Image (spheres, rainbow, N blue to C red):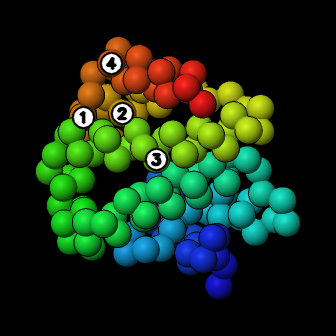
Amino acid sequence: MNSYKGLQVHMSPLNLFRGSAFLGKIYLRRDIYQDFQNPNPKPITISLLEHEITHIKRSSSYGNIKYPLNYWCSNTFRLNEELAAIKAEMKVRKIHGEKFEIEKRAKYLSSYYYLWCIKFNTAKKELTKIWNSI
């Protein structure tokens, strides 16, 4: 079994999303999980792990039932959680001198993937502000 910062990391059986966190465990898409197995995983892989760890850390203050309920039922809560996790992800990318595709992520945040929790222009503005603050 593999772990990152004390948390179990598994290959996602669904292979749909780049990564997800569920019940204190991290699940990665097959290609990302395979990179994680390397002695020196790519910064994008580490940034994704940091994103998911942020969700796990923040969810522990809410409990296993309340966090997902708030996440899926409240656009504001979901947006705030994603912005916090994206900030953790961005920090890793910036440290390694990598770019962050702000427009692409803004499109995801403003789409059905995140239940339209924010408008595209607002998401782009918020993500740019976070990137520039790091």
Determine crowd level at label 3: few under 14, some 14-19, many 20+ residues with C-alpha closer than 10 A. many
The first of marks 1 and 4 along the sequence is 1
Residue wearing tag 1: 117
Task: Give residue 30's quadrant in the image.
Answer: bottom right
**How crowded is the residue under tag 2: few (<14 C-alpha within 10 Å), some, or many (20+)?**
many
- Percent x, y for residue 44? 68, 46
Nearer to the camera, 83 or 34 = 83
Q: Tell me the residue that label 4 is attached to.
A: 122
Query: Which of 63 and 32 lies nearest the eye of the viewer?
Result: 63
Local crowd size for mark 1, using a 10 Å CA cut-off: few (<14), some (14–19), many (≥20): many
- Residue type, numbered disc 2: Leu
User: Residue at position x 71%, y 63% from top?
Assistant: 36
* Relative vertical location of residue 56 with respect to residue 72 in this rendering, above or below: below
Outermost residue toward the left in this view:
73
Residue at (48% x, 21% y) in the render: 129
Label 4 sits on a secondary structure element that is: helix
Instruction: Kindly identify the amino acid type of the residue bearing the numbered disc 1.
Output: Cys
Q: Amino acid at mark 3?
A: Ala
Rendered position, 122 above or below 22: above
Among numbered discs 4 and 2, the one appearing first in the sequence: 2
The numbered disc on residue 109 is 2
Residue 82: mark in rendering: none
For the residues carrying marks 3 and 1, which lies nearer the camera in this image?
Answer: 3
Disc 3 on helix, strand or loop?
Answer: helix
**Which mark identifies residue 85?**
3
Q: Report the Cα–Cα distance between label 1 and label 2.
A: 7 Å
Mark closer to the chain start, 2 or 3? 3
Is there CB contact under 8 Å for labels 2 and 3? no
Measured in 3D between alpha carbons, the distance from the residue under mark 3 to the one under mark 1, in whole angstroms, is: 15 Å
